[in-house]
Image (cartoon, coloured by chain):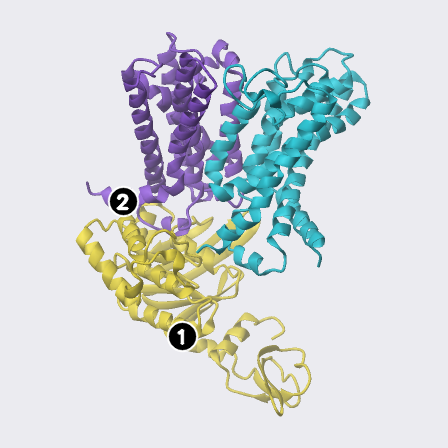
Chain colours: A purple, B yellow, C cyan
Amino acid sequence: MKHLPLWRHELRRAGWTACSPAAALAATLALTAAAAAFGTARPQLERILLTGLEALIPLSAGMAAVAVVSRDPSRELQLTLPTPYTTTLGRRLAVLGGLSAALSIAFSAALALGGWWNGPGLPYAPLVWAAPLLWLTGLALLVAALGRSVVLATTTVAAVWLGEQLFATSFATTPGLRPFFLFMTTRIGVPTDWDANRAALTTSGALLAALALILLRRPERLLTEEET
Amino acid sequence: MDIQITGLRRTFGKVTALDGLDLAVPGGMYGLLGTNGAGKTTLMRVLAGVLPPTAGTVRVGGHDLTTRTGRLAVQRRLGYLPQDLGLYPDLSAQEFLDYVGLLKGLDDTAARRRQIGELLDMVGLTDAVGRKLRGFSGGMRRRVGIAQALLGDPALVVVDEPTAGLDPEERIRFRTLLASIAAGRTVLLSTHIVEDVAQTCRDTAVMARGRVVFNGPVADIVQRAEGITWELVGQGPPPAGGVVVSAVSRSDGTHYRLVSPTRPDPRAVPVQPSLEEGYVALMHAGTSA
Amino acid sequence: MTTARQTWAVTRYEFRMQIRKRSLWITTAVLAVVLTLTQGDRGPRHLPLGTPPREVMAGWALLMSILLPIGFGMVLADRLTRDRRLGLASLLESLPTGRGALVAGKYLGGLASTAVPAALVLLTAAAAETAHRHDPALFAWAVVAFALITLPGLAFVTAFALVCPLLTTAPLFRVLFVGYWFWGNMLNPDLFPSLTGTLLTPLGDYPATWLMGERALYAGADGWLEFLRPQPGGTTTVLAIALLLLLSLPPLALAPPLLRRRNLSA
């Protein structure tokens, strides 16, 4: 593969950011262990493990994506190179997405093998985490590009995530909000419109991410951690 | 690779950094002098394709930099050393150059590695090849910077304030290096250090307030101060009405060299100007000097 | 120059730098508007006329505490780490100002700069409620609610938001902080072992419950660590505030050596 060395470099560039999905899953396991020690029932523990995939992995990916587009000591040089900087950013985001995906698939497989899987059929398992991940990451990138502010982007992600957790009932019962309910699997289960919810999240998430990348093609749209 | 700039404007909100700038740069080593805030870095960034112009045309090697295809064509043949080159601290010099080389499209691994080795040798970093960049001194970082700029054998090299903050020996080594690479390509050297241009460039442009106020042979700048450069030995503060270029305290008093359109003091004697005094005369033309 | 004067100098400039940040104000305004519009039927806006002003403003303070500290945590996350990124670490290390004074100043400045927009939000809510309920005492209770519900939580959040990124990184801290905020403040302790409803809840559950005269969220609800879940009241409110302030001290005490390690590393 011609670009393999470049991907290796981008993996190194991800640095600590790449640890975010692993940290999210480690936190999930720690919470599950604490809950088990507290005497929580097994179905509840299974739901906590699923929450790691559906809620914590997308949150970590969204936050990490903001870090990817906001931090680069060599940005001025990057902007002068024949490889468009958005391509480089795209590679870095793909590395982040790939790591999140690999960890999530491994985690899902481990849960299934251990008999702890409480989600949809395994062929659909990736949609548990992929749909909210894409949506939250797309939102984070778009707010970052529009607002040129790390604080605004991360706060938006945090507020949406918390808002959907706190007002889960409203999201589940309001027809206009239900397609964009990030935590349908863990909060409701796998109802008949689960596929539609995942499709809406995936499509709109891809749209948000595409819009963000178009905006980031303009150098003045690139934010830095400092000017915020 | 020649550069043709016409009516270039670049504004940042209400601030005008480049104000209708016209400039033609032929091949070879070319200097760009100017005070801090004159607009040099903005011009460098426009030439490197980092910033789009607000108005005007910029053609490099016949390519229009205001178009996407033109910008890409120029960037394929460009080497750029920004004023503040940020390096990835966790990489070694070799790894950093490998990464930049890949982004420049140098896909042949063997050829890329060979070129990196040659460049590291050329900038005198062979011994530090495996060390992480976080431990590099300012001079070493600049040398990594020029090595990355030369990757891919670019036809145009744009260097922005490359010697600022370097010690004299490192500065001399660096500008010699720049002069040595100018054969067969265009090197645009932006600096506020007059001596760097005097030692390396035949022609230069001088910028002030976003415009080019001089464009021609370096030697012609000296002429601007002929007849208006004075030396004076005095005990007190320098006389008013001129720009003091140097003041050396000796046993017989302080030896001042000034640029002033009129004799600043009855004791002042006219002297042969230096390039620095020519530059000062140029920058103060129309003001008190 | 005494340590107190040095701390005061750092505090003033940290406050100035923060308070001028566009993102601090936009974030506060957006979150406050979103919370106001989405508060639902149980929110303070829908309390019947004649409700004591104490309850109304406690409701507002609690409502704003759900999300505002998240924004403030995001703002503060890089305040101790940015000096190195900006190349100021060596300069700061060379100054006679001790690291303790620097950390204390950054903490107090950061706290003040987040307290100002938070207080303005509550005063705005008080003004709107006064127009509706015609009771000027709402302003006085806004101040009380701010002091008892909002400020102790901010003191706690500021300390951890400043110091934790020295151990992790700012992006990782932001992820963990959001997770913690949900787990430690709003996750029903009946469903899952969490700090929600304990004396250690920075949301201000105990003070809000005391001011409102009924359980605001989960204060004192049965759950994990029962000894931290006494019956809400005046004494336990004071205890909750004291504990939050006390818990803010260990990270601040750890900050100077962490900062030194960070600033002196290559």
Name the residue located 32 percent from the left edge and 57 percent from the top edge. Answer: B93
Asked if residue C94 lies left or right of residue B50, the reply is right
Q: Amino acid at mark 1?
A: Glu
Image spot of residue B218 (x, y percent): 42, 75
Image spot of residue C173 (x, y percent): 49, 36
| Image-quadrant location for residue C138 | top right
Q: Tell me the distance, in whole angstroms, between the alpha carbons under discs 1 and 2.
A: 36 Å
Which of A111 and C83 lies nearest the eye of the viewer?
Answer: A111
Near mark 1 (Cα within 10 A), the count class, few <14, some 14-19 or many ≥20, is few
Q: The N terminus of chain B lies in which quarter of the figure?
A: bottom left
Image spot of residue B281 (x, y percent): 54, 75
Name the residue located 32 percent from the left edge and 52 percent from the top edge. Answer: B75
Label 1 resides on the chain identified as: B
Image spot of residue B14 (x, y percent): 57, 49
| Image-quadrant location for residue C130 | top right
C234 vs C190: above or below: below
Q: Which mark is residue C34?
A: none
Which of B202 and A60 lies nearest the eye of the viewer?
Answer: A60
Q: The C terminus of chain B lies in which quarter of the figure?
A: bottom right
Q: Which mark is residue B169?
A: 1
C228 vs B122: above or below: above
Q: Amino acid at mark 2?
A: Leu
* Residue A158 visible to an observer of this rendering: yes
Q: Which residue is mark 2?
A: A6
Label 2 resides on the chain identified as: A
Name the residue located 48 percent from the left edge and 81 percent from the top edge. Answer: B274
Which of C239 and C263 lies nearest the eye of the viewer?
Answer: C239
* Residue A208 visible to an observer of this rendering: no
